[in-house]
């Protein structure tokens, strides 16, 4: 019984990672860059939720919407200001800029909200589900449900709409996509918009589970989700989902059965082993090298 | 042997000694206040770290995000050695640096091996993961104090020792890069396939770069531990690795003088901005972004070449003269 409840904990944690990892992987697919600031967008989303609910007294649903809109706008602005001028620069220059943006968001939050962690009321109020002696927390259920729905929507969106197909085309070959009449700049903006909105949702879910938000809230889930994206094969959308959920399950099982403190080390250890066996991640495409 | 005592090398030696003597007399005259003096050793440590990371990132062309991991391994082994070995300082401290460096180099091999299989972003994430694993193990190892930190390390580091170690590091790495081995390392950066087909043992040189860089990072860690007298695992987190990487990138990848200048500025700048304590990180972030944007802005680069055109012409003339 305990194993099952740990598994469900892991699934719900993993689905949060998967949502964040989706943003990483979509941006990587289209821009070939690691968006280090993505983790901090989660933090911004969580702060927005807390402001909307506690200060402005919006109802939960509206608060979540506000937080999504703010994060999506922020994501698009970051792309326009910091990443767009560097589109042809070396990958390392872009990476450093992304780290700069991440520091910028963290220190702005520190200045605006102070270093003390702020208590956030859960936006989700669902009673626990009781099946016999076994109970599942309402929060986990909602997290799982929301993630599954969002993933189905994203998969459908990418494979069936014009914009989604444009995203795939630009990921495949930017130059050819442009020749086919696809507006590359707009497509990249849309990708950042979707990724950041997903990060906001992940932030809301994460904060509902943990209850506190501080300027550095986003950095650890950000790194974990980044690991998840790489584990599944960065650039691959199903890979991000698989990687996130696997990572969540491994983390909560190792917390329960091996050691609470060493769970991070175990998560990273699994990543290294997987990459040694499959250097492109679980579902990553094998790149053939041209001579 | 006559090559060692060229005019250029002697001049370089005089400059190095002069900088040392200048700072030392200034210090002796009480020119520096306590904060400035406390910066001297960290500047040397950061220069060692930046120059050694430059060997991997700038010359080998592989991105690693785990340099702080090497530093922490070296720091912990070196400091454990001085705590438990009851030897006089003159014997103990150099030995500690050597041991710390060698253990870090062993970890360099362990991390270098996956580097042979992985490239680019995948390697970056694996090195990040290694750094985090080392940190969380140190956090839970009661032998080295766990998250409370390792206390009671004798404070052996001083400006003179740090300066000498820094110069040794710079000389070793600069000469390595200029040597046949260094050219092999650079050729791997420029084109792996081409250098492999020219008969360069890629595996050997990749590992060599990792091992040398890790060794010096370990030595820097030992200096760091003996400077503060306490080691905490939280110091060696992801942000520390990023800070070193930022020094390398700001100074210019593959430029040793650049790394030195950037390491100096990045260590001193936060202290100068202490009055603006709250805005320090914000300014730091903005400087980072603006630097990157300007560096990749065509108009700014044009402006820069315009300013440096005169100097570049003179250097170009010097080059052709030397060639003849």
Image (cartoon, helix red, strand yellow):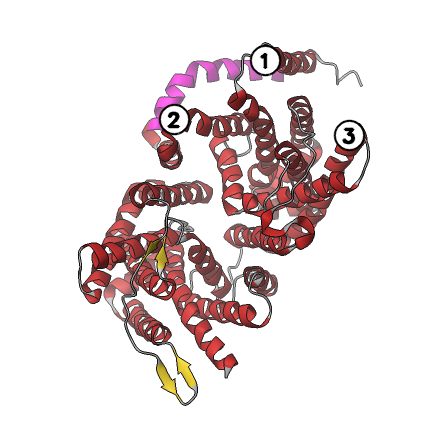
Question: Where does the image place residue B103, in percent across and percent down from the top left?
Answer: 72, 45
Relative depth, front residue between A203 and A159: A203
Q: Position of residue B195 (x, y in %)?
A: 63, 44
Which residue corresponds to the image point at 39% horizontal and 66% vertical from the top-left?
Answer: A16
Q: Which residues are magenta?
A: B300-324
A149 horizontally vs A261: left or right: left
Question: Is residue B323 in the magenta section?
Answer: yes
Q: Are marks 3 and 1 in contact (CB under 8 Å)?
A: no
- Horizontally, residue A198 falls left or right of residue B201, namely left
The CA span between labels 1 and 2 is 50 Å
The earlier-in-sequence mark between 3 and 2 is 3
Chain to which mark 2 belongs: B
- Please determine if labels 3 and 1 lie on a single subunit: yes
Asked which quadrant contains residue B310, the reply is top left
In the image: residue B289, left or right of residue B245: left
To which residue does mark 3 refer?
A: B89
Vertical placement of residue A266 versus B276, above or below: below
Distance CA(mark 3)–CA(mark 1): 51 Å
Q: CA distance from mark 3 to mark 2?
A: 38 Å
Whether residue A173 is visible, yes or no, is no
Q: Splitting the image into 4 quarters, where does residue A12 fall?
A: bottom left
Q: Say if B158 sits above or below B72 in the image.
A: above
Q: Which residue is mark 2?
A: B275
Q: In the image, are marks 3 and 2 on the same chain? A: yes
Identify the residue position indicated by label 1 in the image. B321
How crowded pointer 3 is (Cα within 10 Å; few <14, some 14-19, many 20+) is rated as few
Please tell me whether mark 2 sits on a helix, a strand or a loop. helix
Mark nearest the camera among 1 and 2 is 2
Residue visible at 47% across and 32% down? Answer: B250
Mark 3 belongs to which subunit?
A: B
């Amino acid at each position: 019984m305990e194993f099952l409840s740990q598994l469900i904990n892991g699934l719900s944690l993993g689905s949060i990672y998967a949502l964040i990892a989706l943003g990483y992987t979509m941006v990587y697919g289209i821009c070939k860059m690691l968006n280090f600031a993505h983790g901090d967008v989660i933090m911004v989303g969580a702060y927005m939720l807390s402001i909307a609910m506690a200060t402005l007294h919006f109802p939960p649903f509206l608060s979540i919407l506000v937080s999504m809109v703010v994060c999506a706008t922020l994501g698009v602005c970051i792309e326009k200001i910091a990443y767009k001028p560097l589109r042809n620069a070396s990958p390392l220059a872009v990476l450093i800029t992304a780290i700069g943006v991440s520091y910028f968001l963290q220190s702005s939050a520190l200045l605006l909200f102070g270093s003390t962690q702020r208590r956030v009321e859960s936006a989700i109020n669902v009673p626990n589900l009781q099946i016999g002696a076994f109970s599942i927390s309402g929060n986990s259920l909602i997290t799982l449900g929301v993630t599954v729905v969002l993933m189905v929507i994203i998969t459908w969106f990418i494979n069936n709409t014009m914009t989604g197909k444009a995203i795939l085309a630009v990921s495949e070959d930017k130059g050819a996509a442009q020749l086919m009449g696809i507006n590359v700049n707009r497509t990249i903006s849309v990708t950042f918009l979707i990724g950041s909105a997903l990060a906001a949702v992940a932030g809301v879910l994460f904060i509902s589970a943990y209850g506190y938000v501080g300027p550095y809230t986003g950095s650890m889930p950000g790194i974990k989700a980044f690991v998840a994206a790489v584990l599944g094969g960065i650039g691959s959308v199903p890979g991000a989902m698989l990687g996130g959920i696997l990572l969540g399950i491994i983390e909560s099982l190792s917390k329960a059965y091996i050691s609470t403190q060493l769970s991070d080390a175990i998560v990273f250890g699994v990543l290294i082993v997987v990459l040694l066996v499959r250097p492109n991640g679980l579902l990553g495409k094998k790149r053939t090298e041209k001579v | 042997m006559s090559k060692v005592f060229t005019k250029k090398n002697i001049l370089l030696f005089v400059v190095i000694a002069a900088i040392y003597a200048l700072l030392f007399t200034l210090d002796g005259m009480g020119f520096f206040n306590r904060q400035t003096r406390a910066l001297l050793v960290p500047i040397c440590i950061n220069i060692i770290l930046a120059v050694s990371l430059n060997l991997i990132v700038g010359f080998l062309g592989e991105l690693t995000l785990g340099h702080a991991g090497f530093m922490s391994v070296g720091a912990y082994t070196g400091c454990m050695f001085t705590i438990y070995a009851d030897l006089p300082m003159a014997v103990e401290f150099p030995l500690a640096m050597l041991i710390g460096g060698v253990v870090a180099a062993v970890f360099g091999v362990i991390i270098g091996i996956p580097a042979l299989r992985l490239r680019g972003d995948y390697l970056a994430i694996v090195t990040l993961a290694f750094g985090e694993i080392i940190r969380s193990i140190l956090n839970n190892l009661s032998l080295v104090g766990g998250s409370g930190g390792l206390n009671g390390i004798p404070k052996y580091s001083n400006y003179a020792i740090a300066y000498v170690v820094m110069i040794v590091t710079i000389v070793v790495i600069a000469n390595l890069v200029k040597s046949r081995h260094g050219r092999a390392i650079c050729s791997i950066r420029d084109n792996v396939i081409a250098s492999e087909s020219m008969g360069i043992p890629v595996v050997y040189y990749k590992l060599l770069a990792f091992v040398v860089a890790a060794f010096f990072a370990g030595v820097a860690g030992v200096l760091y531990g003996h400077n503060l007298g306490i080691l905490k695992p939280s110091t060696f987190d992801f942000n520390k690795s990023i800070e070193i990487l930022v020094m390398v990138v700001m100074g210019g990848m593959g430029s040793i003088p650049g790394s030195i200048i950037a390491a100096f500025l990045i260590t001193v700048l936060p202290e100068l901005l202490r009055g603006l304590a709250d805005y320090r990180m914000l300014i730091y972030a903005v400087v980072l972004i603006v630097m990157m944007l300007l560096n990749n802005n065509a108009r700014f680069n044009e402006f820069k070449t315009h300013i440096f055109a005169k100097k570049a012409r003179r250097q170009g003339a010097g080059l052709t003269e030397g060639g003849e």
